[in-house]
């Protein structure tokens, strides 16, 4: 069941979202060749705590870290490790903050050093598909309108849309109803209503969209080992249109 949030609750989520966006920005700066993803995880946790938040993913569904760090063919839920980032990697950072009882969730893909032209294009298309999806998050539209816009744009650019994983509602729990797929038919699915807080998170592949478990046994990667990108924002549906909550003004 979709839980509608009050303006007051959305305000709290926005404060948490600011903390999250600030931490993600710091991690983005740190993600250079030579650093390990475990070092990024430690930094993420320390920063979140310093701002009065808690790492939302730690202990969630058995996940032992604060940060999901997924490199190249790995898409989401990657375990941070002693892997040393190298020039040309593309790194997905997915992080959640629990603040005053409410969660926020955000992901970016970072180019480590100089990356290939195609990798850059994959990242740009994924980021743009998220922006297009957010624009559709208006009262009266449906979940299918978001998925249709996101998915069609990605496929028109020649990339694959991951089917098995999707966005979600968020609030007191990291994952709430409804599910927000990155594909779909216009006008289908639940209607978007004022006070819904959702995460839109396109996961995009350079090759086939099919996925399998990552080598760490927890995360997911592309089945064909092609590169993947992921961007995510938490947003509220308001009478003034979509309001992104995981941004720094
Ligand atoms: Mg999410």
Image (spheres, grey):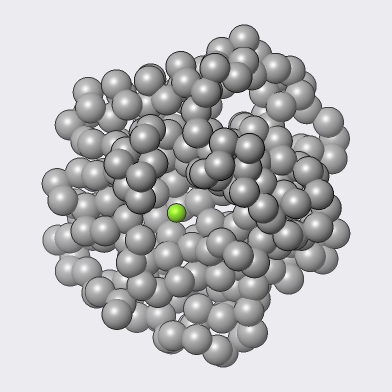
Q: Quadrant of the C terminus?
A: top left
Q: In which quarter of the image is the N terminus?
A: bottom left
Q: Which residue is drawn at 22% across and 23% down?
A: 50
| 248 up-or-down from 240: above or below | above
Q: Which residue lies furthest to the top in this view?
A: 34
| 133 up-or-down from 89: above or below | below
Say whether residue 179 is left or right of residue 54: right
| 6 up-or-down from 69: above or below | below
Location of residue 69 in the rendering, given as x and y in whole percent from the top left corner: 53, 33
Say whether residue 244 is left or right of residue 108: left
Inspect this view and state whether residue 75 appears: no
Q: Which residue is drawn at 43% across and 60% down?
A: 199
Comparing 214 with 248, the one in front is 214
Q: Which residue is drawn at 42% across and 25% down?
A: 41
Ligand 1 shows up in the quarter that is: bottom left
Rendering quarter of residue 239:
bottom left
Say whether residue 200 is left or right of residue 161: left
- Number of on-image labels: 0
Location of residue 14 in the rendering, given as x and y in whole percent from the top left corner: 27, 50
Location of residue 236 in the rendering, given as x and y in whole percent from the top left corner: 35, 64
Say whether residue 191 is left or right of residue 1: right
Q: Which residue is drawn at 62% across and 42% down?
A: 214
| 148 up-or-down from 104: above or below | below
Inspect this view and state whether residue 216 appears: yes
């Amino acid at each position: 069941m979709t839980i509608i949030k009050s303006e007051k609750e959305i305000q709290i989520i926005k404060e948490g979202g600011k903390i999250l966006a600030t931490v993600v920005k710091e991690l983005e700066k740190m993600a250079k060749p030579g650093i390990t993803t475990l070092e990024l995880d430690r930094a993420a946790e320390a920063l979140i705590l310093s701002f009065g938040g808690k790492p939302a993913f730690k202990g969630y569904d058995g996940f032992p870290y604060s940060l999901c760090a997924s490199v190249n063919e790995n898409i989401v839920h990657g375990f941070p490790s002693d892997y040393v980032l190298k020039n040309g990697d593309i790194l997905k950072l997915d992080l959640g903050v629990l603040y005053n009882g409410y969660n926020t969730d955000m992901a970016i893909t970072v180019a480590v050093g100089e990356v290939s032209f195609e990798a850059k294009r994959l990242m740009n298309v994924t980021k743009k598909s998220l922006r297009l999806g957010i624009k559709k998050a208006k009262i009266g539209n449906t979940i299918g309108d978001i998925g249709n816009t996101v998915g069609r744009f990605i496929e028109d650019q020649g990339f694959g849309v991951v089917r098995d994983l999707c966005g979600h509602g968020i609030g007191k729990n990291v994952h709430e109803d409804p599910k927000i797929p990155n594909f779909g038919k216009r006008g289908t699915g639940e209607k978007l209503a004022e006070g819904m807080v959702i995460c839109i998170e396109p996961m995009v592949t350079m090759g086939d969209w099919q996925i399998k478990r990552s080598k760490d046994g927890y995360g997911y990667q592309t089945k064909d080992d092609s590169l993947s990108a992921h961007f995510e924002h938490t947003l509220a549906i308001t009478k003034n249109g979509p309001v992104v909550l995981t941004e720094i003004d």
